[in-house]
Image (tube, rainbow, N blue to C red):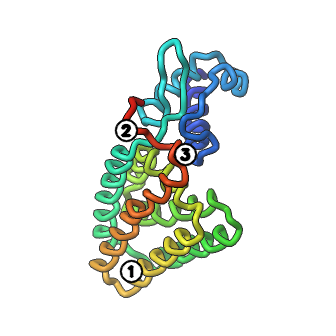
Amino acid sequence: MRRTSSETIYDTLKDEIIFLKRKPGEEIDQDEISKRFDVSRSPVRDALMRLRSDALVVMRPQRGCWVSRIDLSRVDDECFFRLALEKSVIERYKMFMKPSDITRLEYFIALQKEAMEAADTVGFYNADDDMHAIFFEATGLMRIWQLILRETGNHRRVRILSMGSRDVLQKNINQHEELVDALKKKDFTLAVTLETEHLSKLKYETDVIIESHPEYFINRTEEE
């Protein structure tokens, strides 16, 4: 039961941090979490220790626990990690592609369009992830996709922040449509190039994000 409680708390808090329901720098009240889940502080601490390993929280003995501010060097590492794996899976995908995959890809693009019109950032983000997951599912590499989700929490927070702009959302949709067109033509070289451009665009959006939310990022003049 303790492990089940810890896992539940971990998954819930991680989602809240990723989707910025808990803001970078925000203090985490362990007693409040214990009451919320009706558990002792032990499984809460276990969950927070895991989140610390994910670089999503900072724990200081005798002082407390906070949602970590975003470290751009870690974001760069996570972006490189995801890009390397996704490029590889697109190259592998040419051996597995089915017509039904195209239908599913277009379905998730349609969901993104609906989410954009509804100003539903979470819905847009989830449809985006569901679309990318298709390549891993089709190639039998869903464990790799789960690894990406587990290891890229800071990169994912910046992605969520970037989705506050309608222009960014529209560009995301356009790039997805170009990718699907390349796959329809079985031009996998172009597909890899487009996927690389798509996953690299966050680097060019980060300066604007920092300007809008400087308090969310680590100040290089002080220790985290």
Where does the image place residue 177, in percent across and percent down from the top left? 48, 79
> Are the two marked residues, 2 and 1, in contact with CB atoms closer than 8 angstroms?
no
Above/below status of 61 relative to 72:
above
Mark on residue 62?
none
Under mark 2, the amino acid is: Arg
Q: CA distance from mark 1 to mark 3?
A: 31 Å
Q: Identify the residue shown where x is 27% and y is 78%.
A: 189
- Quadrant containing the C terminus in the rendered view: top left
Mark on residue 220?
2
Q: Identify the residue shown where x is 72% and y is 22%.
A: 35
Under mark 1, the amino acid is: Leu
Where does the image place residue 20, in percent across and percent down from the top left? 59, 46
Q: Identify the residue shown where x is 39% and y is 75%.
A: 97
Mark on residue 183?
1
- Disc nearer the start of the sequence (2/1): 1
Under mark 3, the amino acid is: Ile
